[in-house]
Amino acid sequence: RALVAPAAKRPRFTRAFAAAGDPREVLEKAVASALGAAFGPEYNDPSKAALRPATKKTFGDFQCNAAMAIAKPLKKNPREVATELVERLEADATVQNTLATPLEVAGPGFVNMRLSDDYLSTTVEAMATEENCGLPKASQKQTIVVDYSSPNIAKEMHVGHLRSTIIGDALANCLELRGHDVIRQNHVGDWGTQFGMLLEHLGDNTDASISDLVAFYKEAKQRFDSDGDFKERARERVVSLQKGDAATLDAWRKLCDVSRVEFDAIYDRLSVCGLEEKGESFYNDRLSNVVEELESSGVAEVSDGALVVFDEKDKKKEKVPLIIRKSDGGFLYATTDLAAVDYRSKELKANRVLYVTDAGQSGHFKAVFQAAQRSQELGDMSLEHVPFGLVQGEDGKKFATRSGETVRLKDLLDEAESRCLTELQERDSDAEDLTELAKVVGIGAVKYADLSLNRESNYKFSYEKMLSLSGNTAPYMLYGYARINGIRRKAQEEVGVGKVVLKEDAERDLARHLALLSATIVDLERELRPNALCDYLFELAQIFNRFYESCPVLKAESDDIRASRATLCAATAAALRLGLEEVLGIGLVDRL
Ligand code: ARG
């Protein structure tokens, strides 16, 4: 009895049906072209289609609000605009294939749209049988850098880095599924003045234990703060490091290696892979060039001996500027980030760069992006900060151990796993491999808890909540998946898949929600909010339960209905797997 279903056993059948599309995308295009034909080419723009999910089930599935917005410049009555739009839409073959007609104009000029049963059936059939639920690829393939995780050498990787790792990884997965070239970069803090004291301390104590790098860092810092002579030597050591002195570089590498072992152990447990280390040191040789460019273009100026960039809007230069070179000639965090922008644009030819860090760095990124835009040729490359809130204890205070120390990530993951094991034992599960199971569910719980909240809110860390079997949690979702996949497997074995027929309300509700999967993933690609996908999946599990309560699958009245319902089960299992495993990075289990 395998714990996690091997790939071969997961729902995936031979191609037999049409591809699943994204109904929202199809309709946006149709609305745009109808508006263009009716009112002029400037209205042929899918972003003007103003297509929203219907606010009530009785209104259908989507509502198009475009008429209200464009009636004004056209000096027309919105209902007139809507009526004209409806006439053109009804004559469009794609619309006829997608929507139930006639369409309805409601209120001041809304167009209510209801997906046709035929369309829903075909979509569900495709979802049940196609690779990755038939999720369409983005129409334009981009090169996207996701800068995430990014802990610092010789320092503890903390809960902020954990959030960055979990959120960044999910975003990168989503973008990859959409067909983009994704470069996952770990912008590790492996360079800078702090290495002077660390290397000097290491040189003085060749046998000093660096296995506990955090203690080592503290000792070095203590000496740096209290011993003037040591401080001076540390300064000189930074200079040798930057000049590339061989012995200094050797010692530096040794420190990095020790930290890397610790980081990798965490990535391993989180099943994060493909994350490529491009630390701050990588940009060392590029710093002076970038600084020169900033200076010669006049974007940067000297102020109190330092080279700085003022906010463009801050005409009176009252606010603290972005410092890119200190008065002693040293470069900073921001300098490295500007060099990284340059590298990502010129060498990687990225179209989009995402920076997944805590919201505390918003000011930094705003200033860096502005300086980059003013001094460099960025072309169409967009720079986006993806901020997240603080991790807090359940009391809303700083997340810490009982004695007030920072929590080590290793301990945090250990505790999630061991609490999960206790829960499973108490539930008196008959599974033999509870320890293995607890690992998957415990780690999944930590990840899902983070992903299911609005990332910008502060996040109250609670083992109890994340491990609860009820609510929008990993255990609930994993249990739901295991159960639905079990039903799916049995149904498949007995009846396979077949044509989907939607007779009961509960069947149509499920099909409709399934058809919204691709729009949910497209939104994630754009808005970078994994919690919306979690909400979608949570709702899917609940809608499935209502379906399963009222619509027997194996005991259905006819072979056709059995096959149709088996297909609904297969599509649901496939959608849950795609969302949980492929996008959110949550390991699945066969039973719970
Ligand atoms: N090392 C930084 C920290 O621990 C995060 C780096 C984020 N990425 C960047 N390009 N600045 O806060």
Image: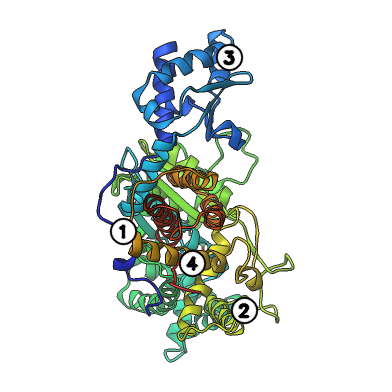
Q: Amino acid at mark 2?
A: Ser
| Pick the front one: 377 or 566 | 566
- State the image quarter where residue 110 is shown: top right
Q: Can you tell me whether the CB of the residue at mark 2 lies under 8 Å from the nearest atom of ligand 1?
A: no
Element assignment for label 1: loop
Query: For the residues carrying marks 3 and 1, which lies nearer the camera in this image?
Result: 1
Q: Amino acid at mark 4?
A: Arg
Q: Amino acid at mark 1?
A: Arg
- State the image quarter where residue 381 is shown: top left
Judging by the rendered image, the residue that carries numbered circle 2 is 226
Element assignment for label 2: helix
Relative to 506, residue 471 above or below: below
Q: Residues within 10 Å of mark 3 (few under 14, many from 20)?
A: many
**With 248 as the anchor, is 86 left or right in this view?**
right
| Pick the front one: 200 or 536 | 536
Which comes before the other along the chain, label 4 or label 1?
1
Query: For the residues carrying marks 2 and 4, which lies nearer the camera in this image?
Result: 4
Judging by the rendered image, the residue that carries numbered circle 4 is 483
Query: How much space separates mark 4 and mark 1, taking CA atoms?
Result: 18 Å
Element assignment for label 3: helix
| Pick the front one: 592 or 284 | 592
Which comes before the other along the chain, label 2 or label 4?
2
Q: Can you tell me whether the CB of the residue at mark 1 lies under 8 Å from the nearest atom of ligand 1?
A: no
Which comes before the other along the chain, label 3 or label 4?
3
Judging by the rendered image, the residue that carries numbered circle 3 is 78
Query: How much space separates mark 2 and mark 3, taking CA atoms?
Result: 74 Å
* Proximity of marks 4 and 1: CB atoms separated by less than 8 Å: no
Query: How much space separates mark 1 and mark 2, taking CA atoms?
Result: 65 Å
Judging by the rendered image, the residue that carries numbered circle 1 is 12
- Residue occupying the far bottom of the picture: 207
